[in-house]
Amino acid sequence: MKLGEILIEKYHIPAVYIDLALKEQKVSGEKLGVILDKMNLVPPEIIARAIADQHNYEYFNIFTSELEDFECDKEIIEEYKMIPISVDNEYVTVGMVDPFNIDNYDGVMRYFQKNNKKVKIAIISNDTYREYLERKTKISVEEIKKYLIGNQTTFTNKDLSKQLVDTEKALRLLLLKGIYEKASDIHIEPTLNGGRVRMRIHGTMNTIMVINEYELLRLINVIKLISTMNVAEKHVPQDGRIDGTFLKNERYVGVDFRVSAIPNWTPERLVESIVIRILDRRTSIMPLRDLGMDKNTLEFLLSCKNRSYGMIIFVGPTGSGKTTSIYSTMATINAIEKSIITVEDPIEYRNFLWKQIQVSPRLSFADALRSILRHDPDILFCGEIRDRETAEIAFEMANTGHLVFSTLHANDSVKAIMRLRELGISRGLIESAVLGIISQRLIRILCNKCKKPISDAKYGVIYAAQGCPSCNWSGYKGRAMVSEMFPFEEKTYHIVDLVLKENVISAREQLTKIYGNMYLNGIEKVKEGITTLQEIEEKCK
């Protein structure tokens, strides 16, 4: 079968996507998979999986599979765009982005035959290859700190001294370390005698290094300079941005850094606190089925994507994966036959087929939504319902022939209804417009190489975190989703009524009887050995 046919028949990719890519292929002459990836029509992992099916190769995804580590020359990995996956007495299994390139294929075969090994080939995506390289690249604290030594603390645009250049190098390494370690935020904070640098990794704050006062001030000043803030202003909050080109490597062009500075008073001085949010737009949309949501939630979302009107709301704290879930759901919609518009702050993933609007100080969510009404959208993603005006416009659109996806800050799906009432949305509008509410959290996944079985009086044999070099001694590697859903349908209308009458406890009990809840979904993952009981107790109660 041809690649396009496999994608349509096995992976349910709309035929119009393949037709569009084939037309582009006649102009560019590139391979179909490359074009589908460039145009963001099909997730890279699905393309790689389909290519493996087409040629009867194995498929390997570093994000969902364990990698056995064995030594392989870095030059070979980079020259032939391959990664070592596993090894036994007879065979090595290697992943290749393009094994159909004769030079690459022959080069890999010669390298391992020289070591008396037979070779098995697996297809990998560019995302898996990039992830492997970044996992293998380590930046030590000592490497960062060697560029911070000195006692000069202030700089101007004209003062391009060696210390400024060195501090820029330190910042560049710090940002790269954040990318490699999958940090969502980097915190540079003052302490009594200096400062510290922390990173939020998989939702947990980790102290990376302690620095003295001179190093802290130099680092803060350079961050403000690079992110186009006013270096002299220290008494009011400021926001800035560092572009991925600052890292001087085309691999990171898709990475963006949002910088926020706030005044922070210590007993002896005023020193700012800096937070750098890492936005890695290189990350592809994950297939909806790979997010780890429970079967009921998955079926509900797949049934809603073809509705012509209504609103689907995702709730949870910041960093709980709400936007990722919406992107993955929207990616299953045929965007060639539909008009899709998003309003986001910030835009986290760019799609060739969507019209995407970036919120700014001069353009609010409400202003953008008002303009969108004149652009005839079928589907709208409103990044967040923050205020009454945004809520009213979004609900008006959901009630007048548009399918609306949005997020809301609420602890669970039941309390989301109460939050909508606080924003001034009438009971009638809630009942008529909302299709359902999904509440979710991200939990840490146990490291398969070091997790240890323990006995629990209630659940029998479960697993605990231990720690090893593979997981950087944390006991965890990666994150998964736990969720609960509240569909607005005939058998749940009485629960909606209970919530609107503020009988929240009874409403939650009734909803749990029908669809379960986030905690029970988490307990299932504990029983399956995916995470720990402690993690579920902390995140889902």
Image (cartoon, rainbow, N blue to C red):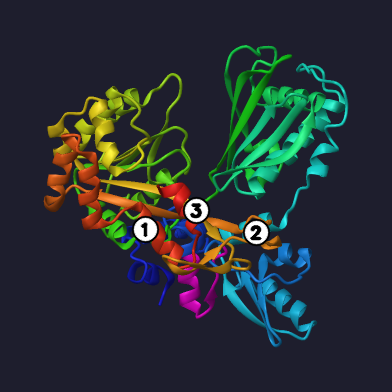
Q: Is residue 290 above or below residue 432?
A: below
Residue 535's disc is: 3
- Residue at mark 2 to residue at mark 1: CA–CA distance: 25 Å
Packing grade of label 2 (10 A; few <14, some 14-19, many >=20) is some
Which callout, 2 or 3, points to the residue nearer the camera? Answer: 3
Q: Secondary structure at mark 2?
A: helix
Horizontal and vertical percent position of residue 289: 38, 61
The residue shown at (64%, 24%) is 273
The residue shown at (68%, 62%) is 468
**499 relative position to 121: left or right:** left
Ranked by sequence position, the earlier of labels 3 and 1 is: 1
Q: Nearer the viewer, residue 94 or 355?
A: 94
Horizontal and vertical percent position of residue 288: 38, 57
**Which residue is the site of mark 2?**
471
**Which residue is the site of mark 1?**
521
State which quarter of the image contains the N terminus.
bottom left
The residue shown at (66%, 60%) is 467
Q: Is residue 373 visible?
A: no
- Specify whether residue 122 is painted magenta: no
Q: Secondary structure at mark 1?
A: helix
Q: Nearer the viewer, residue 132 or 41?
A: 132
Residue 116's disc is: none
Disc 3 and disc 1 in contact, CB within 8 angstroms:
no
Q: Which residues are magenta?
A: 47-62
Ranked by sequence position, the earlier of labels 2 and 3 is: 2
